[in-house]
Image (cartoon, coloured by chain):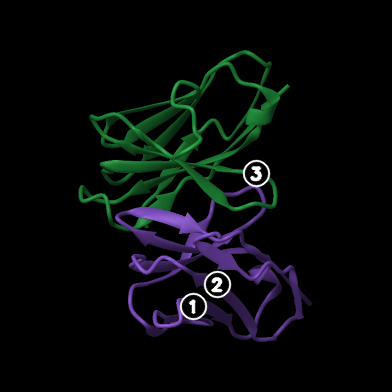
Chain colours: A purple, B green
């Protein structure tokens, strides 16, 4: 069993939709929870970073962590075509990160 | 924000040759850098942890004699793929951890696409 499982997708939504991306994990030692966005042929870029249960909001993005259920989510409100990318969840402990397999999102105009 | 560069961005080489990839933190010092490999439509797989001034720590299944890592300064780590074969063709991505604790935020490089003919 993988330490981090991510909903595989792909996901295709109309512009303006609310998008929900989800990951579960099994290692309770994970301390930090991240979401990265990766465009084709590029390195990942950090979107959200949190270390506690609850919600963290940044513009149209909300990261949600539930440590008791070992479940994290990323919500994108008012999705835009420019949000089309692969989204990777990642969790870390001791400075080492473990990534989910990614969910490819396409937002259609 | 912090910037990490990689060079080259793309390399094509013949089977049996060696390829060196550089990872630099441009505006911060990084005691720890990580090297990842990403195959098409797959996630990043950690290959090794590179620590300045000491030997790299390799993940299980990664051959340390094939993937040579050198972290000679606080801003530069290099990955050398020795005797490359077509199955080594992949997207290699480094990340650098800001600060000297080794557990701060990771900043990723843009990646190097290696194609071995």
State the residue lying farthest toward the front: A1
- Which sits in the foreground, A38 or B26? A38
* Mark 3, secondary structure of its residue: loop
Q: Residue B81: image x %, image y %?
A: 53, 23
Residue drawn at (68%, 29%), measured in percent from left and top? B87
Quarter containing the C terminus of chain B: top right
* Mark 1, secondary structure of its residue: strand
- Find disc 2 in the rendering and name its residue: A23
Q: Quadrant of residue A21?
A: bottom right
Marks 1 and 2: in contact by CB < 8 Å? yes
Residue A51 drawn above or below residue B93: below
Q: Nearer the viewer, mark 3 or mark 2?
A: 2
Residue B18 drawn above or below residue A73: above
Q: Residues within 10 Å of mark 2 (few under 14, many from 20)?
A: many
Q: Chain of mark 3?
A: B
Q: Residue A10: image x %, image y %?
A: 74, 68
Give me the C-alpha separation between circle 2 and circle 1: 6 Å
- Find disc 1 in the rendering and name its residue: A71
Q: Residue B25: image x %, image y %?
A: 35, 42
- Find disc 3 in the rendering and name its residue: B39
Q: Is residue A84 left or right of residue A14?
A: left
């Amino acid at each position: 069993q993988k330490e981090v499982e991510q909903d595989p997708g792909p996901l295709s939504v109309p512009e303006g939709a609310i998008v929900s991306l989800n990951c579960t994990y099994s290692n309770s030692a994970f301390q930090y929870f991240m979401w990265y966005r990766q465009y084709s042929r590029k390195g990942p870029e950090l979107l959200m970073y949190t270390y506690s249960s609850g919600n963290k909001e940044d513009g149209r993005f909300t990261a949600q962590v539930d440590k008791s259920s070992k479940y994290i989510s990323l919500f994108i409100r008012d999705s835009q075509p420019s949000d089309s990318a692969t989204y990777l969840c990642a969790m870390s402990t001791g400075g080492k990160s473990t990534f989910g397999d990614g969910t490819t999102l396409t937002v259609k105009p | 924000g912090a910037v990490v560069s990689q060079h080259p961005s793309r390399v094509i080489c013949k089977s049996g040759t060696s390829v060196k990839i550089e990872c630099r933190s441009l505006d911060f010092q990084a005691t720890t850098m990580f090297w990842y490999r990403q195959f098409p439509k797959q996630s990043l797989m950690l290959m090794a942890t590179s620590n300045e001034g000491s030997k790299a720590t390799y993940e299980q299944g990664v051959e340390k004699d094939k993937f040579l890592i050198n972290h000679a300064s606080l801003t530069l780590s290099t990955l050398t793929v020795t005797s490359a074969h077509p199955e080594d063709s992949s997207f290699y991505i480094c990340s650098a951890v800001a600060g000297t604790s080794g557990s701060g935020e990771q900043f990723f490089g843009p990646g190097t696409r290696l194609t071995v003919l």
